[in-house]
Each structure stands twice: as C-alpha cells, then as structure tokens.
Image (cartoon, rainbow, N blue to C red):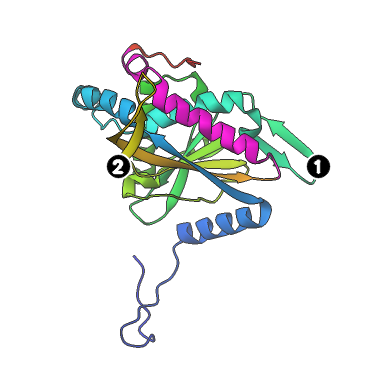
Amino acid sequence: MNTPDASEPHGNAKVRLSRLRRRIAENVSESRRTAAHVWTAVEVDYEALEQVRRRHRSEFREREGFSLTYLPFIATATIDALAAFAEVNSSVDFADGSQTMHEGVNLGVAVDLDRAGLIVVVIHDADDLTLVELARAIHELAGRARAGDLRPAHVSGSTFTITNPGSFGSFMSAPIINQPNVAILATDGVAKRPTVVAGADGSDSVAVHHIGHLGLSWDHRAFDGSSAALFLGRIRDSIQTWDWERHLTGGDSAPEG
C-alpha cells in the first residue's frame, strides 16, 4: 500500500508510484513516441445482438459460471475483420524498413486490475476459437490477471489488442497502441438511444435501440485511413447482420460474408 508523505502540505497526500504504474507509464509514453497515432470511430447498432444475448444470458451464466458480455461477440467479429485486413494485424520495423503480416491472431485483451493498473493478456491462436471458447479464454485470463497468476506466455506475443472501457460506461475512447501492434480497438459503452431504422419497404422510422461506438487507434506508418474505416465498417456490419444465434448455440465461428 502507498504511504502518504507527511511533509506534504495539509490536504495533500504524496504517494509513491507503484511498479506497475511506472511500467504502464513507460510503455504508453514509448508507444506515443514510436507510433504515428490516429483515431477513427464508428457507431454500431447492437440491437439484434442484444436480443440474442438476452435470450441466452441466464442459461449461459448457469452453464459457464460467468456473464455473457458484448466482448466475445465483438472479438469474434474483430478476428474476422483482421483476416480481411492483414495490414491491421501486423507489426512494423521502421529501422529495417519492413512490415510483418501475421498469419494468425494472437488477441490481446486489456484487463483492469481494480483501478491499480492495466495488463494485456494474450489469447494465442484466437482465430481458431469459437465465440464461446473466446468467452471462456477471456474470463479465465482476466481471472488469472486479477489473482496475480499469469505466466510469461499469458502476456506476450499479441498481434492485435482490444480494450474494454465500455464496461465502465465510456462513450468514446482513443487508447494508446500496445506495441508492437499497429492498432488497438476500444469497445465503448452501449446504451438505449433513438435511431433511424430502415423498413423492408424502404421507409424510415425512429426506434429505440442499443447503440454504442467502436474506436480504433492505429499507426499511420502501417496503413492509411481507408483501411481503418473499412476495417471498422466490417466489424460494425458483422455485429449488425450476423446470425449470432448460430454462433452462440452452434459453436460456429466461421465468417458469414
């Protein structure tokens, strides 16, 4: 526990930065110096996904022992998009003048340690997992992180990272890239909002849907805005149109379109 410095004026408390806080500060500062950070965001209508989640969340919690959140759905759609946009699942060696396109997806997931800091756990070969298997892996590694039970393999080798400030109610976030990745996706809060819905006959109406935002911080050295926008658009379209019932109950993680 940090001990206040008695020499500070009344009302102030000077504490020592923890080892983890110092490490985070070093890493994010180095990332800002290294990568040419740009941020792009899209709005997402989660209503269809939310209806599936509601139908299955009680049974899922009873069977798996933890809650069915939006994160594994978003991770599944993100892994599909990474296969279509190899430049987003890459790393850059600017001194060497090279860019490595990673064959598979080692998905990093930022875990909050009860506001004491963040750590990125890594799901290796995440592109081989179904939605339910991803949910289990995220839950297990987050639990290990909070219990201080991580091994080196659990925190190394990520090719792309997702951070989830939406669980704390964020609206839009522009996170710092997790080096040596070239992009990081922020999954922000989902809330009921009025939105325009197109009918089958082409008419428009206003409905209350579950709406959220996805924000991508990306390295302009690795790719350009067109890739960032199209990558996010693919994730958005997948969230809005995929048959999530089949993914959740049938264990099917294959791309749908």
- The magenta-colored residue range is 221-249
Q: Is 229 in the magenta?
A: yes
Residue 206 disc label: none
Earlier along the polypeptide chain: callout 1 or callout 2? 1
- Which sits in the foreground, 200 or 184? 200
Place of residue 28 in the rendered image (x, y in percent of width and height, measured from the top left) = 56, 55
Residue visible at 63% across and 43% down in the picture: 180
Left or right of residue 27: residue 7: left
Q: Which residue is mark 2?
A: 193
Residue visible at 39% across and 22% down in the picture: 202
Give the amino acid type for the residue marked by disc 1 in the picture: Asp
Badge 1 marks a residue whose secondary structure is loop
Does residue 208 lie above or below 131 as drawn?
Answer: below
Give the amino acid type for the residue marked by disc 2 in the picture: Arg
Q: Which residue is mark 1?
A: 96
Badge 2 marks a residue whose secondary structure is strand
- Which sits in the foreground, 69 or 210? 210
Place of residue 214 in the rendered image (x, y in percent of width and height, measured from the top left) = 45, 40
Left or right of residue 213: residue 249: left
Whether residue 219 can be seen here: yes
Q: Residue furthest right?
A: 96
Does residue 97 lie above or below 12 as drawn?
Answer: above
- Which sits in the foreground, 22 or 199? 199
**Badge 1: residue crowd in 10 Å (few <14, some 14–19, many ≥20):** few
Q: Is 199 in the magenta?
A: no
